[in-house]
Image (cartoon, coloured by chain):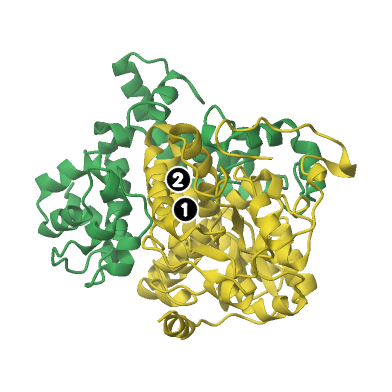
Amino acid sequence: MELLKELEKDVRYLEGLNSCINCGVCTAICPAAQFCDYDPRMIADTVQKGNETEIEKLLKTDTIWYCGECLSCKTRCPRGNTPGYIVQALRALSIRTGMFMESKQGQKQLAIKRTVGDHILKHGYCIYIDEVDTEMYPEQGPVWDWLKKNRVQILDRLGTSYGKKQSGTLRKTSKKSLTDLKRIFEETGATEQFEKIEALSAQKARELNIAFSEGKDPYFDSLYNGDE
Amino acid sequence: MKETKNRIWEAYQKEIAGDHYYFARSCIRQNFFPAAEDLFLKIIREVAGKNIYDDAWQTTCTGIAYHSGIIPFETTMTVVTRQFALMTEAGYTNFACSCVTSFGIYIEVVETWKNFPQKEKEIRDALKRATGMTFEIPKNLVHTSDLIYKFRKEIACKIKLRLINRQTGEPLKVVDHIGCHYAKIFPAKGIGGAEFPYVLAGLIDEWGGAQVDYPERRHCCGFGFRQYLLKSNRGYSLSNCKKKFDSMEPFQPDLIIANCPGCTFFLDRWQYVIAEMNGITYGQNGYGIPVLTYEELAGLLLGYDPWDMGLQLHQTAVEPILDKLGVQYVADDKYKGKDRIDLGKPDMPAVLRSI
């Protein structure tokens, strides 16, 4: 597989790279570059040079997973490049080729698939109150514990539709809507991608001798709570 | 200087339809600020007198999954077109979404198709195969903060309080935080563009407050999608917010308002974490700086009960801004459920002052 040719099939890559002049404005404005070992200028430069070996290295490193997708780089680039889009294309290719499993950050995609990804198909929301607790999200603070404990009474006072089959805040997503989402995921490659992430993660867990099953198993915990 | 700058900001405008909107909800807002969206609908319907449709069949746009790199762009595009199809079926052409991530995605999808028309056909076919649905592209696509901005003068006519400190008579100092995906991706789609967004500053000006122009005003809140979603990466989010708080602190803001669901959440919750971890508080007398959404601010000024608007669910206490504004509220009602049943108080943070 020629990696550059694969990237060039992705609209995010085609819109993301025009011609980088290596000015570094993207890195100067980048929130990730301020706190991580991350340099969007280098990413744009690497793909622009088109060296297959270097692109492959990139697909296997933590680097492409540090971007926070704020897309501040799109605003400021004087040549109309968007390193954040290039990163999106690199991430997609890294998953498609299985190379994401070569990096610790890439491996963490399983934990996101098992939270946000599964919540979408289960609830119709990326995030849903029933799935959020202060053990996984301690920054929610004691007010969240109070809300969770009293959620029926509080959400009733606030006039929400929590758990109800009607319009409104936190309504129960209809079976028809969830079926539509499932079919869209199957039709457009998300289901296949989820299955790939699960299958390759199972293999990695076996290599590392960490118990792997489903949901918040020990392998999930090692990724979710593990090293930065 | 400040007057000149304000005039420059006002020069950037965008088209916002005057009535009849299809309303798309936000995953984060519904969960973390569960009264905010219905408050928004109440203001649009009862204060501005406009028609807005709340659809039971809608779902997430999948934006958080897309920006975390777990699903293909094609999946997100197709889910977005299902939302457009629901709008079309309901007989609407103006689309108003409550989430800034969604807003960026809806615009991104439509703009991508302008450069890659074959992609539009591919997605239309995928939606048809998956759901049997067809759709029209919205004629007008806005964020809900755009609508509050558009009707800010109508709201101003009905407010009972202005952004004035009732003790000193001085304008309250308000930090505006604009979600990155509101205008950094497509500057022409945001009021004021990416560098000088006016969508919230316009509310501050109209309702009598003073803007706080601090160095990191445009810096990201640090959501970072996959960075926040993983506990092991979450330092990214906290660090970026701290950078903003440290930058705004010397200006002693009375209030932070934000138009992005995630930003509002992080600016509220990370103050609690910084207080508990480092003993630092950014407000006065051990409190944090209260953080409100744009419609929560409008609701307070309109005289609505803060506890019916869900302000007790903010971890950073809102009482300092209620008292400065002169909001009449019953302190004992804060932690009550429906029919004023007492639910007991949440545990209080060890450092961040709460009531």
Q: Which quadrant: the N terminus of chain B?
A: bottom left
Chain letter for yellow?
Answer: B
Vertical relation: B92 (above or below) B324:
below
The percent position of residue B65, horizontal first and vertical second, equals 47, 47
Protein chain holding label 2: A
Labels 1 & 2 near each other (Cβ < 8 A): yes
The percent position of residue B241, horizontal first and vertical second, equals 42, 49
As measured in the structure, the alpha-carbon distance from the residue carrying label 1 to the one carrying label 2 is 6 Å
Vertical relation: A92 (above or below) B279:
below
Residue occupied by mark 2: A190
Which element is circle 2 on? Answer: helix
Chain letter for green?
Answer: A
Look at label 1 and name its amino acid. Thr
Look at label 2 and name its amino acid. Ala
The percent position of residue A125, horizontal first and vertical second, equals 60, 46
Instruction: Choose between B13 and A116: the one closer to the eye.
Output: B13
Mark yes or no: residue A228 visible: yes
Vertical relation: B322 (above or below) A185:
below
Badge 1: residue crowd in 10 Å (few <14, some 14–19, many ≥20): many
Protein chain holding label 1: B
